[in-house]
Amino acid sequence: MNGRRVKILSARVVGAILGDSKPGQICEVAKTTCCVATSKGALSLVEVQPEGKSAMLIEEWLNGARLNTQSIFGV
């Protein structure tokens, strides 16, 4: 994400998504929620570990991360 590795430690399946988001693309982001499109729906992130940092809940990460619906998780 933005040139830095982010491990997804915990996520929930949220089913189908609206729009034409590509797999890995952020399809929804709010103050306490971040959903990522997959090939079969979407995942709501619960816990992540940014590169060089400790594991944190998605709400904590979103406080400092600058994400929008154009952001994409790379491989």
Image: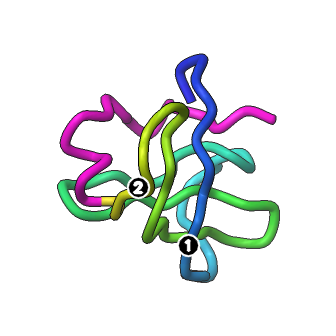
Q: Is residue 65 above or below residue 54?
A: above
What's under tag 1, amino acid-wise?
Ser
Q: Which residue is mark 1?
A: 10
Per the image, label 1 sits on a secondary structure element best described as strand
Q: Counting residues from the N terminus, which is met first, the one under dot 2 or under dot 1?
A: 1
Magenta region includes residue 39: no
Name the residue carrying label 2.
28
Q: Is residue 68 magenta?
A: yes
Residue sitting at x 32%, y 34%: 65
Q: Is residue 13 left or right of residue 56?
A: right
- The magenta region covers 59-75
| Structural crowding at the residue carrying mark 1, measured as other residues with C-alpha within 10 Å and reported as few (<14), some (14–19) or many (≥20) | some
- Give the CA distance from mark 2 to mark 1: 17 Å
Q: Is residue 56 left or right of residue 35?
A: left
In the displayed structure, 67 sits above or below 27; it is above
Q: Residue at x 37, y 34 (%)?
A: 67
Determine the secondary structure under disc 2. strand
12 vs 60, nearest the viewer: 60
